[in-house]
Image: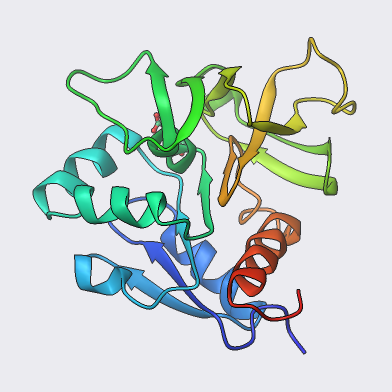
Amino acid sequence: MLPGAGLRVGVLALQGGVREHVELLTSLGARAVLVRRPVQLEDLDALVLPGGESSTIDRLTRILGLRDPLRATLAGGLPTLGTCAGLILLADRVLDPAPGQQSLGGLDVTVRRNAFGRQVDSAEETLATTLGPVRAAFIRAPEVVAVGEGVEVNARRGDDVGDPHAPIVGVRAGSLLGISFHPELTGETTVHRELLRLASVRRGRVG
Ligand code: GLN
């Protein structure tokens, strides 16, 4: 049975790399639900906040009345994966924000936007993570520069997730997973499988 069978996974669909997440989740057997209105957050088993431009997504969540419902959803423990701009939205603290930019918060980390350089410095590489090797694309990616107590470091740039000097690019705290990179652009399924596992556990099924 596919890991997403019977699971409804929302993908915040305001801007950015929505389609790739929908296709990946669908290939894993999940039903992907585009989230553009608060009512679409109901009855989800998990949620993905995709990459894109975090300041634009932030502005749109406020214009569309999604900010408070999203914050309540995250606080309610819905398994949620934030990739790149999505990680920035999850972070409690954002360095180098755009003017007026806010995050949703919930994840006790500090991120620095565009920490690894410009679009032209984008790179695809294999990371050693606590979930195993992950093929990752970095596109104007944020770095996690500080983590609070209770936040697990799951991925660092490079081939040694235990190297305390390597930049942090993947974290988990409870139901929230945040990654700086894009697995959905490389055909990598490991992180989405982990999200679906958390969703299954929450549904009380055997993961
Ligand atoms: N630099 C973007 C931001 O600040 C994130 C880039 C991405 O999601 N690929 O939102």
> Is residue 37 something that shows in the picture?
no
| Colour setup of the view | rainbow
Can you give x and y, in whole percent of width and height, for residue 139 in the image? 55, 34
In what quadrant of the picture does the C terminus appear?
bottom right
Can you give x and y, in whole percent of width and height, for residue 185 in the image? 62, 54
Locate residue 127 relative to residue 105 in the image: left or right: right
Locate residue 39 relative to residue 23 in the image: left or right: left
| Above or below, comparing residue 200 to residue 188 in the picture | below
What residue lies at 60% left-to-right and 30% top-to-bottom?
Answer: 122
For ligand 1, which image quadrant applies? top left
| Above or below, comparing residue 146 to residue 27 in the picture | above
Question: Which picture quadrant has residue 94?
Answer: top left
Locate residue 31 relative to residue 168 in the image: left or right: left
Q: Nearer the viewer, residue 114 or 106?
A: 106
| Above or below, comparing residue 28 to residue 56 in the picture | below
Question: Which picture quadrant has residue 105?
Answer: top left
Can you give x and y, in whole percent of width and height, for residue 205 in the image? 69, 81
Can you give x and y, in whole percent of width and height, for residue 40 in the image? 28, 73
> Is residue 23 something that shows in the picture?
yes
